[in-house]
């Protein structure tokens, strides 16, 4: 079984009772049946926290009647809480629908999964939550991006909790103080992030996947700032795990791992005991500030250190004091200038 999936076998017994008579033919058809089904859900690693409950994967399930009929209806269930660590199913809510609903979050495993998200013009939407909050920074990576805009993403929080080799390459990592962390997002029920969304051409997907190799790729549905869901999903780079990175991204090869991380003496990527890279953090804060006060405050108060308690606002007022006054190296002033 792939490491990035959980297989859950559930036995669902449907009993529908009626207050009115006579029931419709469709309701009669579903009035009492038992069936079993297999679920394959993205394996996401939420971490326990005092500030955040384990994040539920909302995954609609479609149950077909055991005996197929010509005008069969679909009976869709929204499992309100399937916790990855607990692996328990709570009572489902019955929702009648005429079509199969798509999961709110889907993991993208390969290039073909990305292509399923393409719009007719061959573009795909990308979420920015850190350096990509800056349009200038985004265009340095994706020169031909279009429709750069601000959006909202529910159910995720930002966390500085993984080592980024690019900081070592550019000479801005400080291993002596553990200020070597880049930013990712992870599921967290009740959290809301202000992000950016933009479109890139499908030809840029392979380079994007290679550049963001350490992340878990998810398809999510952002919202406008007034709460209207987007018409199509966007790609989000979320927290991964060391085991999956080695087994899947590196194909179990120590040589491949060395090329990406080992040559910088990095033996563990995802860590809770590291601090933000100073130059990178300053860049992200300035980028958020340039988007307006709402995005700025959201970044300061909904972005955490690896302890999942200390916000960036608190960090900048204590151990990180002085970061915002530090200029990047001359060669990186444009790249990390907010």
Image: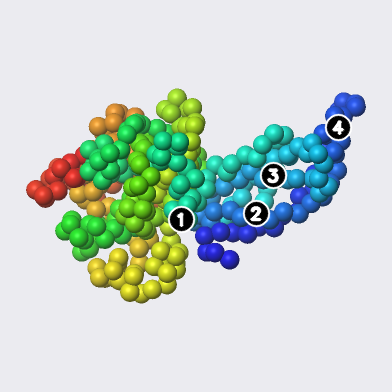
The answer for how far apart the CA atoms under marks 2 and 1 are is 20 Å
- First-in-chain label (1 vs 3): 3
- First-in-chain label (4 vs 3): 4
Q: Can you tell which of label 1 and label 3 is closer to the viewer?
A: 1
Q: Residues within 10 Å of mark 3 (few under 14, many from 20)?
A: some
- State whether residue 127 is above or below residue 166: above
The answer for how far apart the CA atoms under marks 3 and 2 are is 10 Å
The answer for how far apart the CA atoms under marks 1 and 3 are is 25 Å
The mark found on residue 110 in the picture is: 1
- First-in-chain label (4 vs 1): 4
Q: Secondary structure at mark 2?
A: strand
Task: Give the residue pinned by disc 3.
Answer: 62
The answer for how far apart the CA atoms under marks 4 and 3 are is 19 Å
The answer to whether residue 170 is seen in the rendering is yes
- First-in-chain label (3 vs 2): 2
The answer for how far apart the CA atoms under marks 4 and 1 are is 43 Å
Contact, mark 3 vs mark 2 (Cβ under 8 Å): no
Task: Give the residue pinned by disc 2.
Answer: 39
Task: Give the residue pinned by disc 4.
Answer: 25
Does 155 sit left or right of 70 as displayed? Answer: left
- State whether residue 104 is above or below residue 111: above
């Amino acid at each position: 079984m792939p490491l990035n999936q959980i297989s859950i076998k559930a036995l669902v017994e449907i009993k529908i009772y009626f207050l009115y008579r006579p029931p419709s033919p469709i309701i009669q058809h579903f009035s009492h049946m038992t069936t079993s089904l297999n679920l394959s859900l993205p394996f996401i690693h939420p971490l326990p926290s005092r500030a955040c409950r384990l994040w539920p994967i909302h995954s609609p399930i479609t149950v077909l009647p055991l005996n197929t009929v010509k005008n069969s209806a679909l009976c869709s269930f929204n499992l309100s809480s399937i916790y990855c660590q607990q692996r328990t199913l709570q009572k489902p809510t019955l929702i009648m629908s005429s079509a199969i609903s798509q999961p709110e979050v889907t993991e993208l495993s390969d290039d073909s999964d990305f292509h399923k998200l393409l719009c007719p013009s061959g573009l795909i939407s990308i979420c920015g939550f850190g350096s990509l909050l800056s349009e200038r920074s985004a265009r340095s990576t994706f020169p031909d991006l279009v429709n750069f805009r601000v959006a909202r993403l529910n159910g995720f929080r930002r966390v500085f909790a993984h080592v980024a080799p690019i900081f070592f390459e550019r000479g801005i990592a400080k291993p002596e103080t553990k200020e070597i962390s880049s930013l990712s997002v992870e599921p967290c029920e009740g959290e809301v992030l202000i992000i950016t969304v933009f479109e890139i051409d499908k030809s840029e997907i392979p380079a994007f996947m290679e550049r963001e190799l350490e992340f878990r790729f998810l398809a999510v549905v952002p919202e406008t700032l007034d709460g209207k869901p987007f018409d199509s999903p966007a790609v989000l780079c979320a927290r991964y795990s060391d085991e999956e990175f080695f087994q899947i991204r590196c194909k179990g090869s120590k040589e491949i791992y060395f090329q990406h991380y080992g040559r910088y003496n990095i033996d563990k990527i995802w860590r809770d005991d590291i601090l933000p890279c100073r130059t990178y953090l300053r860049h992200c804060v300035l980028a958020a500030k340039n988007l307006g006060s709402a995005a700025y405050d959201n970044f300061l108060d909904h972005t955490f250190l690896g302890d999942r308690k200390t916000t960036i606002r608190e960090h900048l007022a204590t151990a990180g004091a002085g970061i915002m006054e530090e200029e990047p190296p001359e060669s990186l002033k444009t790249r990390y200038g907010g």
